[in-house]
Amino acid sequence: MNAMPSDRIRRSFSRSFNSYHCAAGPQARIARQLVQRLVQLGAPDHFDALFEIGCGTGHLTDALYSTFSFRSTKLNDLMPEAQDTALRWGAGFLPGDIRTVRWPETPDLIASTSTIQWLDNPSAIIDRAIRQVAPGGWVAISSFGPAQYSELFALGSAARAPGLSMPEDLARGVGPEVEILDLWQDRNQLWFDTPLDVLRHLRQTGVNGRAAQVWTRADLTDFSARYRAEFSGPEGVSLTYHPVWIIARKPV
């Protein structure tokens, strides 16, 4: 990854792997919403083969398995620890960078949540998924938009993911023959008691892997003061989430 080297993101998410599942409440909700939207759009109850990109601790995997049945499943993740998710569901595991690993042949569902924003060209993954999915197959992929963690960006943080995209950006390379069923976005805020709680949330979810700075006590004091001054509200201090997704179906 040009904007975020694979080894750095791997280390960051590996450190937070044990805390991620409980701390990543917004990501879990997005996964459930994506699966619910698939159902609303008429996805079949059974898929022959699922390929999931960036399975992590299994928020999306769990939601998919609770809703659909699969003959076979292949899960990918950059972190080797994510093999535990595959083992939990009896799925195959494909470790490594999604841009360089060999994808399974013609799955009929390719899905991913909260992953491709860490790539410098996320729309390329959408394009590849459309090409790789079987005729009549479904692609359902969520990411995050440019307002994600806007408070941190406003304060000069370097933790911003390189591939933040609007829904229409994700669909840019999709050909006219492909049926785009849904382009969606939302913006919501989490509230924390203090700016230090915001930093703790980022550390527990591993999303601060792009920030290489070492925090001194003076840095933390200054950060807290500026955060409170600009982003305080009646519920504490805010942190913005900006989920986006694309759901498409390939013609038969």
Image (cartoon, helix red, strand yellow):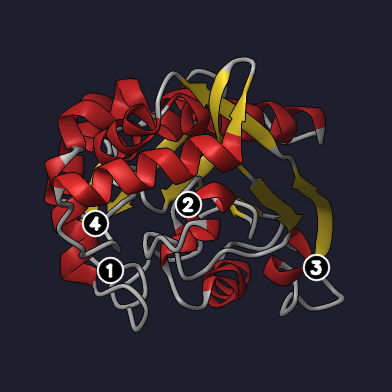
Q: On the image, numbered disc 1 is attached to which residue?
A: 97
Please give left or right for residue 70 compared with residue 247 in the image.
left
* Pair 4/1: label in front: 1
Q: Label 4 vs label 2: CA separation?
A: 33 Å
* Pair 1/3: label in front: 1
Q: On the image, numbered disc 3 is attached to which residue?
A: 178
The kind of secondary structure element at disc 3 is loop
| Amino acid at the residue labelled 4 | Leu
Q: In the picture shown, does residue 240 fall above or below 62?
A: below
Q: On the image, numbered disc 4 is attached to which residue?
A: 94
User: Front-most of 129 and 113?
Assistant: 113
Q: Residue at x 28, y 41 (%)?
A: 221
Q: On the image, numbered disc 2 is attached to which residue?
A: 152
* Pair 2/3: label in front: 2
Q: Label 4 vs label 1: CA separation?
A: 9 Å
| Amino acid at the residue labelled 2 | Leu
Labels 4 and 1 touching (C-beta < 8 A): no
Q: Give the mark, 2 or 1, whose residue is nearer the N terminus.
A: 1
| Amino acid at the residue labelled 3 | Val
Q: Label 1 vs label 3: CA separation?
A: 26 Å
The kind of secondary structure element at disc 1 is loop
